[in-house]
Structures are given as C-alpha cells and as structure tokens.
Image (cartoon, helix red, strand yellow):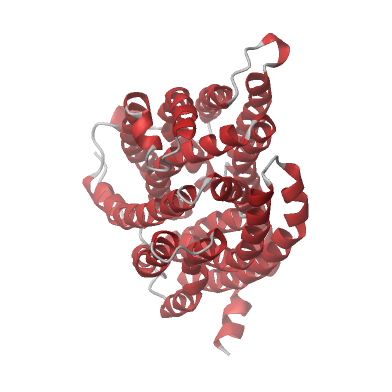
Amino acid sequence: MRQKKQEALIDKRLFYRNLARLALPIALQSLMLAAVAAGDALMLGKVAQDEMTAVSLATQIQFVQNMFLSAVTAAGAILGAQYWGKGDRRTLEDVFNIMLWICGAVSVLFFLACELAPKQLMRIFTDDAPLIAIGSAYLRIAGWSYLFTGISQCYLTTMKVSEHVKPGALISSCAVILNICLNAVFIFGLFGAPRMQARGAALATTISRVVELVLCVAVSFNASCIRPAFDRIMRLPKQLGSDFVKQCLPLIGGSLCWGVGFTSYTAIMGHMGTDAAAANSVAAVVRDLICCMCNGIGSAAGIIVGNEFGAGRLELGKAYGIKLRNISFVIGFFSTALVLAVTPVVVKMVILTDQARGYLTGIMVIMSFYMIGRCVNTVTINGVLNGGGDTIFDMYSLVVCMWMIAIPLALAGAFVLHWSPLAVYACTCLDEVGKIPWVMVRLRKYKWVQDLTRQMNTP
C-alpha cells in the first residue's frame, strides 16, 4: 500500500526523462574514462604482458588519489544539488571554492609522492623487479597529470549538479578520445614519435588531462555556468564549511575504506604470481567498463533526490529513492548477463599465457555474480542515501563487510591456506554481495530523507 502511494507521487514520464538526461551523459563520461584503462590494457597487452601488468598496478596510485577526490567532490555534489534545487547560486559558488582548496592540496601531495618515491609505491603492489622498474618509469611521467586531475574534477562536478551535465560529458569524452589516440602514437611509436611503451601511456594521460582542464575553464565562462568565486575564495562561510566537513569526513572514511581495500585486493592478487595479476588486471578493465551504467544512474540518483530535498519536496524525493532502488536491481542482473556474454571475446583479445587465460575465464564468471551487488549498492548507497546526506552508512558497511570479512579471508586464503587465485578472488567479491540485505534495511529507515540547506549569512 505504501509503495503504491509513493508510486502515485511520481510523474513517470518526467522521472525517466530526468533520469535519462542526467544518467546517460554521466554514464558516457564514466565509460570514456574506463575506455582509457581499456585502451592501455589492450595496447600494452599487444606489446608485452609485463608492460600491461605494471601499468595496471601503477595506476592503483591514481585510484587511491581518486578516492580522496571523489569523496570531496561527492560532498560538493550532495550540497550542490540541494542548493541548486533551492535556487541558491551564490552558495553553490562557495561550495565550488571549498572543493578547489581541498582537491588542489590532495593533487599536489600525490604528485610529489610519484616524483620522489615511485619505486617505494610500486613495491606496495608487487615484489617483481621488472614490474617495479616499468611501473616507476610510468609514475614519474603520469604523476604530472595528478596535478590537473583534482581541479578538473571540481569543474566537472559543478557542471553535473547545475544542469550542465552534457558539456561536462563532452569535455571528458574529448579528453579520453585524445588520450586513446595519443596512447597509440606514443606506445607504438606512430608517425615518427618515439616508441615509449608504458611511458607513452603516461605521457598521453598527462597531455589529455591538461587539455581537459583547459576545456573546463573555457566552458565555465559561459554566463549560465557556475564558476569559482575567486573574490571570496579566502573567506568562505563558516556555516557552509561546517556542513561540508560534516558530509565530507564520512565520505573520505568510506572512500579510504573502499579504495585502500580495493587496492589491497589488487596487491593480494599481484603477490599470487604474474599470471594471476595479469588476469585480474584484464578483468578489472571489463568490470569498470560494465559498471558505467550503474555509475551514471547512481550519480543521477543523488542529483535527482538532492534537488527535490533542497526544494523542500521530501515525499517526492523519497518516492524517487525507492524507484531508483528498484531500477538498480534491473541494472545488476543485466550486468551479470553482459559479463558472461563478453567473457569468451575478452579471453581471446589479449596476449596471455595459458595459465593466465584460465584464471581470467574463472575470474570473469565469479565477477558476474559480484556485479549484482556492485550495481545495487552503487545506486542505493552512493546515489539515494548520499543524496539525502546519509553518508555515514557507507563507511560502516565497508568496515564490516570488506575489512572484517572479505580482506581477512583473502589474506588467509592467499598466504596461510594457499588457496588457488580463483578462490582468493571470490573472497574479494564477498563484500558487495554480502551487504545487500543490510542496505535494504537502511533504506527503509528513511534517515536519508532530509533537507540539508540553510540560509547563509552573506557579507
């Protein structure tokens, strides 16, 4: 009965139009970003298995950086969506300023780490000397791209929440297409360029990030776009800063739990041999490509729910949240079928040893079931719950399901019980599937149904 009442609040045509308007460009943006990793893997896989594996391991550094950046920009998106729904443009500019401060500092720290200690960073993921040498050379060049990534993500996030999602997706797509083209040029030495292999992939990434930031700044000068308020960047509203920190800290905790945990999975597989690491690297690219749709719907869910809450329409926002939860299950089962369908094609596409090929087939089958949990949790937690400011739950669920169950089992299986790589990989998939019932209970408590906006005291 309650669900029917909630459904009655929804104008389905308007809902699906808004969902498509937001989700499709964001999904395209996510797909294009994942395509860079796919391009690296495919091109380097044609060169040598070690080149492909080393770059896959080295990019885990950027993965960790992105955990910080995504937490900060997610906090900005939560508050930004609600203030945009309220019609408060000035406060959204201040949110933009806060994101720039924090993301800029994070980007500088990761740049310095890659330039000053690349070998030490690579040793976190592997003890294989050739992989360390290749990965270190990659990081010294790719580290420069980390300086620009944080700033461009602030611009793209602000575009996303202020109804400029299409220009943001177009910018990301252009940068990715440039990245892939330059990958081919520098990895294989086309058109007279030096044949740089792994270092070529790093150079291509750096150039494309510079272009992405330039395009973001250029587009932001459109009168309808939100730009940083540089005249106020040194005097941010204390109330807004406090609200931002309240949202951001749990997100950083959750991102670190998930990011370091996911990196731990890669490190564990990396220490199980080159074949297992190579198979895991290829499967990770496929996973990221197929997750693009749930990423798009998850981001759109947060914006849609946040806009309604900021405008004071709490019941409608709640009804949207339940509807989006149902959609997440459909996307999850579709993703499972898609992984199984592409497995034979993927196994034949890259150059692997027979042992690595066998591992890859098994990993893809296991990953197909993992996709259900990944899609449901991405849309429900990162979209619906976060859209209403319920950011603490994600951290709790990760501490329990990932750090108290999945990681200890994977470590024990790899280094104590000496299980096969497939059994260890299955352990790394337990966290997403295992927390679905818990997520459903949390959703029904409706703690996420709240208006986070307030009237700011402006000078």
User: Hey, which quadrant is residue 371 in on the image?
Assistant: bottom right
Q: How many marks?
A: 0
* Pick the front one: 159 or 109: 109
Answer yes or no: is residue 381 visible: yes
* Pick the front one: 359 or 382: 359
Provide residue 306's location: percent of width, then percent of height: 47, 59
**Up-down relation of residue 201 to residue 370 (above or below):** above
* Pick the front one: 4 or 223: 4
Query: Can you name the residue that lies furthest to the bottom here?
Result: 1
Residue pictured at 62% horizontal, 32% vertical = 176
**Drawn side of residue 322 relative to residue 146, left or right:** right
Provide residue 429's location: percent of width, then percent of height: 52, 64
Q: Which quarter of the rendering shows the N terminus? A: bottom right
Residue pictured at 51% horizontal, 30% vertical = 220
Provide residue 237's location: percent of width, then percent of height: 25, 43
Q: Which quarter of the rendering shows the C terminus? A: top left
Provide residue 87's location: percent of width, then percent of height: 45, 50
Residue pictured at 38% horizontal, 63% vertical = 416
**Up-down relation of residue 244 to residue 389 (above or below):** above
Answer yes or no: is residue 308 visible: no
Residue pictured at 52% horizontal, 27% vertical = 209
* Pick the front one: 459 or 48: 48
